[in-house]
Image (cartoon, rainbow, N blue to C red):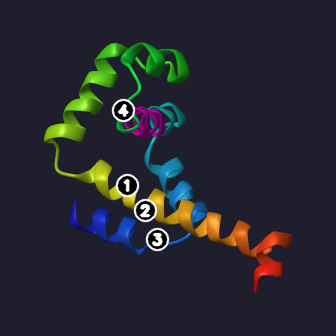
Amino acid sequence: MEDLLEVFAGLTRPDDVFALLEDLFTVREIKDTSQRLDVARMLRMGSSYAVIEKATGASATTIARVSKALNYGAGGYGLAFEVLDAKEAENGEAAKSESPTAEGEN
């Protein structure tokens, strides 16, 4: 398992990560994993199970498992949120610097 962890930690380009995921997992497994991250985001925002079920198609059991991991897990979702939040902030800063208003303020 150490080798797999080292490989994931060493990949920096999303396309490379996706290529590895495609080789390791079925398309269904990749979609299910992505769905769990969507569920975790929505739980973090305070969405109800019913709203999450409708928006993601996840079952109540899956939502409950993700909720349990968010509350009592190893912190992996929190680390994922840090990555996504940093990327969102980076994209927001890039959008600000490209806007005419931002240029006029400099």
x 21%, y 52%: residue: 75
Residue labelled with disc 4: 43
Which quadrant would residue 96 be assigned to in this image?
bottom right
Distance of mark 1 from mark 2, alpha carbons?
5 Å
Q: Are marks 2 and 4 in contact (CB under 8 Å)?
A: no
Three-letter code, disc 3: Leu
Give the magenta part as a residue range.
33-43
Residue ID for mark 1: 80
Residue 11: give its label.
3
Q: Answer yes or no: do the residues labelled 3 and 4 have beta carbons within 8 Å?
A: no
Q: Is residue 94 above or below residue 82?
A: below
Q: Amino acid at mark 1?
A: Ala
Dot 4 surroundings within 10 Å: few (below 14), some, or many (20 or more)?
some
How far apart are the two marked residues, 2 and 4, measured between alpha carbons? 17 Å
Which one is closest to the eye, mark 3 or mark 4? 4
Q: Nearer the viewer, mark 3 or mark 1?
A: 1
- Sequence-first tag of 3 and 4: 3
The structure residue drawn at horizontal position 46% and vertical position 59%, both measured from the top left corner, is 85
Is 103 rendered above or below residue 50?
Answer: below
Question: Marks 3/1: CA distance?
Answer: 15 Å
**Is label 3 in a helix, a strand or a loop?**
loop
Mark 2 highlights which residue?
83
What's under tag 2, amino acid-wise?
A: Val
Quick one: 37 or 106, which is closer to the camera? 106
| Category of crowding for the residue at label 3, using alpha-carbon neighbours closer than 10 angstroms: few (below 14), some (14–19), many (at least 20) | few
Residues at marks 4 and 1, CA–CA distance in whole angstroms? 14 Å
